[in-house]
Image: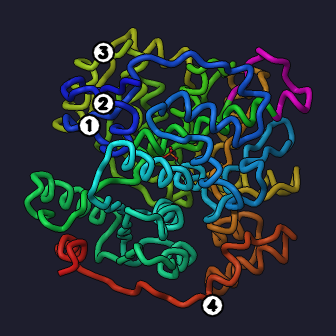
Amino acid sequence: MIYQSTRGASAPVNSAQAVLKGLADDGGLYMMKELPAFDWQGCLTKDTKGMAKQILGALLPEIQPMDELVERAYTGKFESEELTPTVKVGDFTVLELFRGPTSAFKDVALCMLPQLLTAAIQSEGMEKEILILTATSGDTGKAALAGFADVPGVGICVFYPHGGVSAVQRAQMVTQKGKNVRVCAVEGNFDDAQTGVKNIFAACADGKLLEGRGIELSSANSINIGRLAPQITYYFKAYADLMRRGEVKLGDKVNFCVPTGNFGDILAGYLAELLGLPVGKLICASNTNKVLSDFIHTGTYDRKRPLHKTDSPSMDILVSSNLERLLYLLSGQDAALVADLMKQLNTEGRYTVPAELKAAIDGQFWGDFAGDAETSAAIDRVWKEHGYLCDTHTAVGWYVAENYVNQTGDRTPMVVLSTASPYKFPAAVLSAIGGDTNGDEFDQMERLSQITGVPIPRNLTGLKELEELHTGVIPKDQMLSFVLGE
Ligand SMILES: *Cc1c(COP(=O)(O)O)cnc(C)c1O
């Protein structure tokens, strides 16, 4: 299957090469040239792993044997083999994506990516080891570490901002076991860590620094099609659940509201629709960093604004990489246009899409945002009215979904994607429902569980007692030497 760069200046590749490379050489992202024929109705009759096998088999045909890879990725890793359950909460359906090994929705993709990558290494006959470099603001780091730990032929190195992640997130990362994992704190903020990683990629691009070391660098970021494709599955899973409960008949539309940061999760919903799933509106929910909801309203993407620290930190982002893929798809694969817009974003910090493209976006998407106060109020309301405890990111989605219904009157069944366990953000959740936030995050977790009766996920209990294996802190200019082991 042919994948081409959204910016049109790199040679086409097959799906295995696209997964290995991550980013195209011209800076663009890989997208399939044509969609495969896909039996979406048949897909809806399968169990979750069966859906994943069909979807990934269709989109990544050069990576094999897909059935086995899916089994290896998911079996025994999630709370149930259903992987991503749905729960009816009031008028909405909540799609729980956080029942995986690290209690974050990124597990769905990061359990699968290592399998895809190692199979791609084999099919492409690569002899070098792949070293995954990742900067994290909290969630990606642990999900990637858990996914790649002890995977043969791959190493992983995660950098996080010193003092910039929650105590729970830090504990999750620094206690990670595995012969091939390294974790290090960087003095600076998330942007410093991310810039440091980009600089390492740039410094190693000509291959000289890595010569004789037998390694090649890659990324576990959602720019990789191997991370995006596994996320399509749960849109089918949610739809099948609604059918089973008699809420929709085959062919009825369903709306999805997605708490959004890098635009990967919601883009997977659009790909599900392109494969045939009857998707109504895709509702993009932002926090105070509402660059995307502004874009959907105005057609102008403007990243020249301060980045706010919010209670939904995994969405604190101003440059949403995967939006580039949407622009490419909705413009009829106009790579010249996409390359021009991305250049404007780089040089001027903003761009405005042509009217036709704006109209195409309006037809499919709706956007709005929730500040911290609205987020907190939504957690409290959902808990008091429905006895359902949700995390801050999910609450952003809930609030925006309610606004959508109130403003449009659209009564199409609504699925709200839930992207993290409330126990990953215990202080904000506890304070939202009026609990006492004294003590450290582990005390808060306990108290939250006592008040609500909602069990703490197994991977988070006992975290405080685990041995800390990775306690290093380095200045940001030493990241390259850390990677090279000097
Ligand atoms: C990463 C993340 C998001 C945002 O997902 P994108 O695919 O980047 O839009 C939302 N919520 C949580 C908890 C996350 O970890």
Give above or below for 390 relative to 59: below
Q: Quick one: SS at disc 1?
A: loop
- Per the image, the residue denoted by label 2 is 13
Residue located at (50% from left, 29% from top): 59
Q: What residue type is labelled 1?
A: Ala
Q: Which is nearer the N-term, disc 3 or disc 1?
A: 1
Q: Distance between the residues labelled 2 and 4?
A: 47 Å
Whether tag 1 and tag 2 are in contact, CB under 8 A, the answer is yes
Above or below residue 102? Residue 287 is above
On the image, numbered disc 1 is attached to which residue?
24
Q: Position of 65 compared to 377: left or right?
A: left
CA neighbours of label 3 inside 10 A, class few (<14), some (14 to 19), many (20+): some
Residue 278 picture quarter = top right
**Residue 484 drawn at (x, y percent):** 20, 73
Instruction: Estimate how packed mark 4 is, as few (under 14), some (14 to 19) or many (20 or more) residues with alpha carbons within 10 Å.
Output: few
Q: Is mark 3 on a helix, strand or loop?
A: loop
The image's mark for residue 465 is 4
The magenta region covers 241-255
Ligand 1 within 8 Å of the CB at mark 3: no
Residue topped by disc 3: 334
Q: In this view, does 212 lie to the left or right of 230?
A: left
Task: Measure the C-alpha gap from mark 4 to mark 3.
Answer: 53 Å
